Image (tube, rainbow, N blue to C red):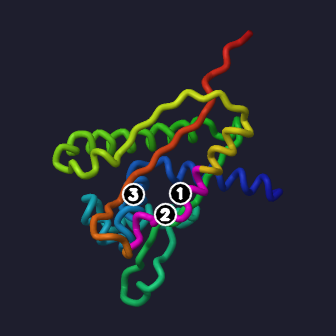
Amino acid sequence: MTDAADEARNNVGAVRALAHPLRLRLLDLLRFDGPSTATRLAGRIGESSGATSYHLRQLARFGYVEEAPGHRGGRERWWRHRERPVTLRAGEEEHDAATLLAELLSREAHALDRFLGERARHPEWDAAAFFQSRALRLSPMELEDLRLAIDALLAPLRRAEDVEAPRDAVPVRFLAFGFPLPLEAS
């Protein structure tokens, strides 16, 4: 098998590994709350430690989680979130990619709904939170440049799991979408 075929197979597998609501929930907990064990995560989400352990191993297989350094020893394995981009080329398991995107968007919409429902209790965050929708006319190269500029802007910011943060810092979700509208046939 060629390197390109291996990469495509791994990306398809990676998308399938993510397209599971429990795995996405585990990733959110590790991403926003920091390293944990299968047993601790199981208690937080009401699942068995065997189930969470299995799903963590599947996530590790595709590089979404890894063993947390500094937590070695003892019986339990500590896991932490690991950034891992996934890209699929057109035509490669589009159903899997669509399923994953639908699940991700559903999770983000639920998180936004929770924030909007509770924002009166946290007025200090109301002015800082933002929701933007802009209509732009860009070439594919300009859209790629925009994505890279956003990546560069976000790179120096603290990750949610960082412990050295100001007292008033809390985990924040950041979403940005950039995609072309369907082109009409001429």
Read off the residue under disc 2: 157
Name the residue type under label 3: Asp
For residue 25, side relative to residue 141 (left or right): left
Could you tell me which secondary element the residue under label 1 belongs to?
helix
Residue 64 at x, y percent in the picture: 53, 62
Say which quadrant the C terminus sits in.
top right
Could you tell me which secondary element the residue under label 3 belongs to?
helix
Q: Earlier in the sequence, mark 3 or mark 2?
A: 3
Q: Is residue 21 above or below residue 56?
A: above
Q: Earlier in the sequence, mark 3 or mark 1?
A: 3
Q: Residue furthest top?
A: 186
Q: Quadrant of residue 71?
A: bottom left
Q: Which mark is residue 28?
A: 3
For residue 162, side relative to residue 154 (left or right): left
Residue 50 at x, y percent in the picture: 36, 67
Read off the residue under disc 1: 154
Say which quadrant the N terminus sits in.
bottom right
Q: Residue at x 65, y 51 (%)?
A: 148
Magenta span: helix, strand or loop, mainly? loop
CB of mark 1 within 8 Å of CB of mark 2?
A: yes
Q: Disc 3 or disc 1, which is closer to the eye?
A: 1
Q: Which residues are magenta?
A: 150-162
For residue 110, side relative to residue 183 (left or right): left
